[in-house]
Image (cartoon, coloured by chain):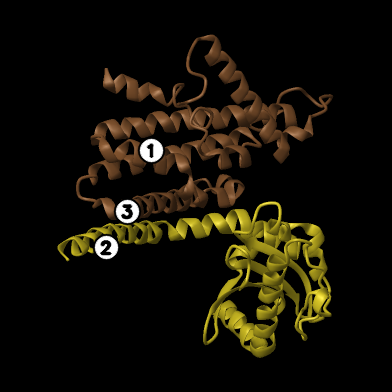
Chain colours: A yellow, B brown
Amino acid sequence: MREIIRLVVVLSLICGVAAAALTGVRYSLEKRIERQSDFYVRGPALERLFNQPAVQLLGNKINFMTSNRVYSVFYTKSGDDVTGLAIEAPGAGGYGGDIILMVAVDLASDQMTGMEIIQHSETPGVGSRVEKVSFRNQWAGLSVSEPVKLRSQGGQIDAISGATYSSKAVVNGTNQIIELMSGHRDEIIAAIKSKGNG
Amino acid sequence: MKFKQVLLHGLWKDLPPFRLVLGLCPALAITSSAEKGLGMGLAATFVLIFSNTFISALRKSIPDKVRIASYIVIIATLVVLVEMSMKAFFFPLSQQLGIYIPLIVVNCIILGRAEAFASRNPVFLSMTDGLSVGIGFTISLTLVGSIREILGAGTWFGMSLFGASFEPFGFMVEAPGAFLCLGLLLGLMNAYSRKRGEMFIQS
């Protein structure tokens, strides 16, 4: 009995110290990591999606809260009108966890203009091919009014061969954005406008 | 005397990954350029030094039955620390190494040194052991990375070496090139060891 207690206490202590150390470091580095990831990943992705320099776009950001999640939403404006959105969402079901992706939507035509992968932990050389232009190009011109599906389920997207899970995760993420757009489109635009005025 | 032995053993006698033949996964996977090899080596060295230090310091209080679990918790914590610091300070490199940074947790060299050395030697010696093996690992990975990058891309640490007329041997930066390069180096090293009369395969 005494031995068991000792095992439990020692292991718990080690885990406790480890958790405390990780929390501390994460807390102190979080802002820096966020900035780096804006500079190296989100910036270039936004540049490709909107054809504008990243410096302007990175500032155009709101955090939009729904009942269960916070979404990062970037936008472009012409004059006072919001012309385009780029919404970031996690695609559940990847082989190595969620795939974080960003979809750009043109508000005039209600069509997607592109998709970018922000972060993933897929198998190198297999699932990581979701980053390839040939896969991402399929998003240009998709409508935001109906859910996206893989071609094997009667949809529009060709999955990457050998990486069905990863392809499915990206589709899931896209559908989450479509759902957000259909339910909260006007709220998002209002939030952006109120940010601009205030 | 003991100290000097521990300090130098990781550089030839137990040189990873060649002599230990452990840690081959990162050695094959990320050595497509010298920079990636160096980055991976340094990350692993950091984890090795500190995991050896902590495990050695705690070796008398960790009960035998939960030692592997305790080692893994310590190693995993250090790896996540490295991962976060790399993202904060060397973001492009962390993007290139990607999944292989978190995978340091299961790098056999680190658990191997913890179990074979740090769990039965004093703190300072264990730290030295981590440093020695870590530096050996870094040198090996940088060497393999350099060879593959120079032959396969005609560059070294991103600097162009031969000018535009050089036709790179692209095979070397692909996965099969890693096996070829590592195998040839291992063979050369064994041949050299045998010539010097050393035991050419670890007993």
Graded by Cα atoms within 10 Å as few (under 14), some (14 to 19) or many (20 or more), the crowding at tag 2 reads: few
Structural distance between the alpha carbons of marks 2 and 1: 23 Å
Chain under label 1?
A: B
Chain under label 3?
A: B
Residue B142 visible: yes
Q: Where is residue B134 in the image (x, y as percent from the top left)?
A: 43, 33
At 21% from the left and 63% from the top, the residue drawn is: A4
Q: Name the residue under label 2.
A: A12
Q: In this view, does A136 lie to the left or right of A100?
A: right
Label 1 is placed on what type of residue? Arg
Q: Of the numbered discs in the image, which one, if any, rests on residue A90?
A: none
Label 3 is placed on what type of residue? Ser
Q: Name the residue under label 3.
A: B70
Q: Is residue A59 left or right of residue A156?
A: left
**A54 and B31: which one is in front?**
B31
Graded by Cα atoms within 10 Å as few (under 14), some (14 to 19) or many (20 or more), the crowding at tag 1 reads: some
Q: Mark 1 points at which residue?
A: B113
Residue B49 visible: no
Q: Position of residue A100 (x, y in %)?
A: 61, 67
Classify mark 2: helix, strand or loop.
Answer: helix
Structural distance between the alpha carbons of marks 1 and 3: 14 Å
**A174 and B4: which one is in front?**
B4
Question: Picture quarter containing residue B6?
Answer: top left
Outermost residue to the left: A2
The tag earlier along the polypeptide, 1 or 3, is: 3
Structural distance between the alpha carbons of marks 2 and 3: 9 Å
Q: Position of residue A109 (x, y in %)?
A: 82, 81
Q: Which quadrant of the figure contains the N terminus of chain B?
A: top left
Let me know if marks 2 and 1 both belong to one chain. Answer: no
Q: Position of residue B148 (x, y in %)?
A: 68, 30
